Amino acid sequence: MTLSPTRLAAATLVLVAVYALTLASVHPWDLAIGALIALATLWTFRGFLFDEQALPATRLLRRLVAFWPFAAALVWEIVRGTWFVATVVLHFRPLSHPGIVAVPIAERSPLGVAVSGLATTLSPGAFLVDVDWERRVMLIHVLDASDPDEVRADHQRFYRRWQRHVFP
């Protein structure tokens, strides 16, 4: 499969931005290493990531613009998750109902499922355990599974509001 230069550049920029956000660094060496990792990842998984027709330029531009609110919302989820875990660890809140919740995949593409899993795991207090493709659910372990419907609603809300505009 051939990958257009425009598509490769756009995907590389997005991955480098995520890498820089993860490291909380924009040092030139960090960006260069991020670009190498991004290019290697895109080349290795090009058949999986780019198995459909290239997006029209306007749709790609909309996704690039929507990435920044998505990234900001993800940072907010990380802050919220960190606060929640800190309150549990410091015994301000009891750890009474940890467990696994089945979150429907719904209209997510395979790439959207992967990004949802990564976004979930980046925020402390929850992580992706497995994806059951037959049942079309993501199995997510959360520290507070006392209300599984609320956990599912939170994940669906985040997807609909922020993620699906960038990684459907």
Image (spheres, grey):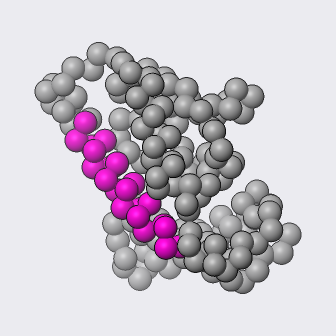
Camera-nearest residue between 32 and 148: 148
**Overall secondary structure of the magenta stretch?**
helix
Camera-nearest residue between 150 and 145: 150
**Where does residue 42 sit, x and y in percent of width and height?**
68, 67
Q: Is residue 105 left or right of residue 34?
A: right
Question: With respect to residue 4, does 153 lie above or below?
Answer: above
**Where does residue 15 sit, x and y in percent of width and height?**
54, 68
**Where does residue 143 sit, x and y in percent of width and height?**
35, 27
Residue occupying the point 62% across, 38% down: 105
Q: Quadrant of the N terminus?
A: bottom right
Camera-nearest residue between 65 and 21: 65
Q: Quadrant of residue 50?
A: bottom right
Q: Is residue 37 left or right of residue 23?
A: right
Question: With respect to residue 69, does 105 lie above or below?
Answer: above
Residue occupying the point 35% across, 71% down: 25
Q: Is residue 13 left or right of residue 30?
A: right
Residue occupying the point 56% across, 55% down: 164
Which residues make up the magenta segment? 64-84
Q: Quadrant of the C terminus?
A: bottom right
Residue 118 in view (yes/no) = no
Q: Count the marks.
A: 0
Q: Quadrant of residue 73?
A: bottom left
**Where does residue 40 sit, x and y in percent of width and height?**
66, 69
Is 70 a magenta residue? yes
